Image (cartoon, rainbow, N blue to C red):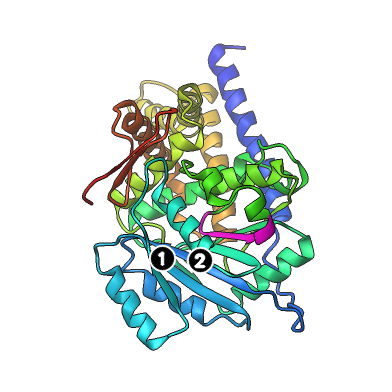
């Protein structure tokens, strides 16, 4: 067996394993149930929304939360020192909906991420037995909170999260955002998130983190993850370490989200998370980039070169350089299509998976560059560098 043939067999085998993991995940990841909450014992739910420069989103989000089909809840929005008119939008909403509670965020202290500091202040101001932390760019169906509570009570979870429906309008969103679903569903057996206590099996969606307040306090709340860029994943690890249970559901019919609106937002948003999500481990991100290039990008290069040489009459289409790589591209496209069909993602971009992975690799390298340069990760006009013990936070102009 030649080295190239061995390489192709290995890549094809990896993709086949990913197919098995994905199919199992699609069966294991159940839709958020529509069970009813006991009307006689409706615990108080605090819905908590951190908002920094969210003038374009906060009205839609807050109104969807205020219209929840549930009797005992409060909605609290924290304006995190916004300078884009978010405060004016919130003032207008309060005039129309006096029961909406708006608080002004205090200055960001050193050693804290902006979102974590905002969420800590929200939790301190809340009164509910259950806490829902949700992002300002989400929109919730009227029964979403009631359904989440019923699911939490039925499953006896201490932390519940959902996969939300993603709104994507620009080509950059459509190319990159589906890779979130791809990375989780093709690499991580999701059932192990709630059946295995190992912190290796950890995933949650920061757009919807629903806590039992007792567990939230037990793990130290947001102070325990104050420097974690991917605080949702670290929360899962903390809950597991405390002996709690985490549950993940498919909630695309309950909550929608518009994460990013431009190439700049996509680039910065993913750059702040990738290196941090790997614990700032250079070896891990190097292996991830090399593996992603070899499995998803290199096969397309082989196919294009083979076709060019074949059409020029210089070579035949061989298994090593054409048929195996073509099969690999086909399997990768099937993976993307299966995910797209289940989670209402764009199908056409599934055929551009190699391009999506090239963008992912570029973003991953940029996330390393931000930290290696000493500048830190940039998000919402603030730079953070929590890659070592000497954590710093620098506020800059957006």
- The image quarter containing residue 304 is top left
Q: Can residue 68 be found in the magenta stretch?
A: no
214 versus 234 height, above or below:
below
Residue 125's label in the rendered image is 2
Circle 1 crowding by C-alpha within 10 Å: few under 14, some 14–19, many from 20: many
In the foreground, 318 or 88: 88
- In the image: residue 27, left or right of residue 345: right
Q: Marks 2 and 1: CB-CB under 8 Å?
A: yes
In the foreground, 381 or 303: 381
- Residue 237 place in picture, x, y as percent: 64, 42
- Residue 367 place in picture, x, y as percent: 37, 35
In the foreground, 97 or 343: 97
- The image quarter containing residue 103 is bottom left
Q: Can residue 209 be found in the magenta stretch?
A: yes
Numbered disc total:
2
User: The N terminus appears in which quarter of the rendering?
Assistant: top right
State whether residue 12 appears in this view: yes
- Residue 35 place in picture, x, y as percent: 74, 75
- In the image: residue 131, left or right of residue 391: right
201 versus 211 height, above or below:
above
Residue occupying the point 61% across, 35% down: 15
Helix, strand or loop status at disc 1:
strand
Write down the residue under mark 1. 78
Of the image marks 2 and 1, the number of the one nearer the N terminus: 1
In the rendered structure, which segment of residues is drawn in magenta?
206-214
Helix, strand or loop status at disc 2:
helix
- In the image: residue 249, left or right of residue 92: right
């Amino acid at each position: 067996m030649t080295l190239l043939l061995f390489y192709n067999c290995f890549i094809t085998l990896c993709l086949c394993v990913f197919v098995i993991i994905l199919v199992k995940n699609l069966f294991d990841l159940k839709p958020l149930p529509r069970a009813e909450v006991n009307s006689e014992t409706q615990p108080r739910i605090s819905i908590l929304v951190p908002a920094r420069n969210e003038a374009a989103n906060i009205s839609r989000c807050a109104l969807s939360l205020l219209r929840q089909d549930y009797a005992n809840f409060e909605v609290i929005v924290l304006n995190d020192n916004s300078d884009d008119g978010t405060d004016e939008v919130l003032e207008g909403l309060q005039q129309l909906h006096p029961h909406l509670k708006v608080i002004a965020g205090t200055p960001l202290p050193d050693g804290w991420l902006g979102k974590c500091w905002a969420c800590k202040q929200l939790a301190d101001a809340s009164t509910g037995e259950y806490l829902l932390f949700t992002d300002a760019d989400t929109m919730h169906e009227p029964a979403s909170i009631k359904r989440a509570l019923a699911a939490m009570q039925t499953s006896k979870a201490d932390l519940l999260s959902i996969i939300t429906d993603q709104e994507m309008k620009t080509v950059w969103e459509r190319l990159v955002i589906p890779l979130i679903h791809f990375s989780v569903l093709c690499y991580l057996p999701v059932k192990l998130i709630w059946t295995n206590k190992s912190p290796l099996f950890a995933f949650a969606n920061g757009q919807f983190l629903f806590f039992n307040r007792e567990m939230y306090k037990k793990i130290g709340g947001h102070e325990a993850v104050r420097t974690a860029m991917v605080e949702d994943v670290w929360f899962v690890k903390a809950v597991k370490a405390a002996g709690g249970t985490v549950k993940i559901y498919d909630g695309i019919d309950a909550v929608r989200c518009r994460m990013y609106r431009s190439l700049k937002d996509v680039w910065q948003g993913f750059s702040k998370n990738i290196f941090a999500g790997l614990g700032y481990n250079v070896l891990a991100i190097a292996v991830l980039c090399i593996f992603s290039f070899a499995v998803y990008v290199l096969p397309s290069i082989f196919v294009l070169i083979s076709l060019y040489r074949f059409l020029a009459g210089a070579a035949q289409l061989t298994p090593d350089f054409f048929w195996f790589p073509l099969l690999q591209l086909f399997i990768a496209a099937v993976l993307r299509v299966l995910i797209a069909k289940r989670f209402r993602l764009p199908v056409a971009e599934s055929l551009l998976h190699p391009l999506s992975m090239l963008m992912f690799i570029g973003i991953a390298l940029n996330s390393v560059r931000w930290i290696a340069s000493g500048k830190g990760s940039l998000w919402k006009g603030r730079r953070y560098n929590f890659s070592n013990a000497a954590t710093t936070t620098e506020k800059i102009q957006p």
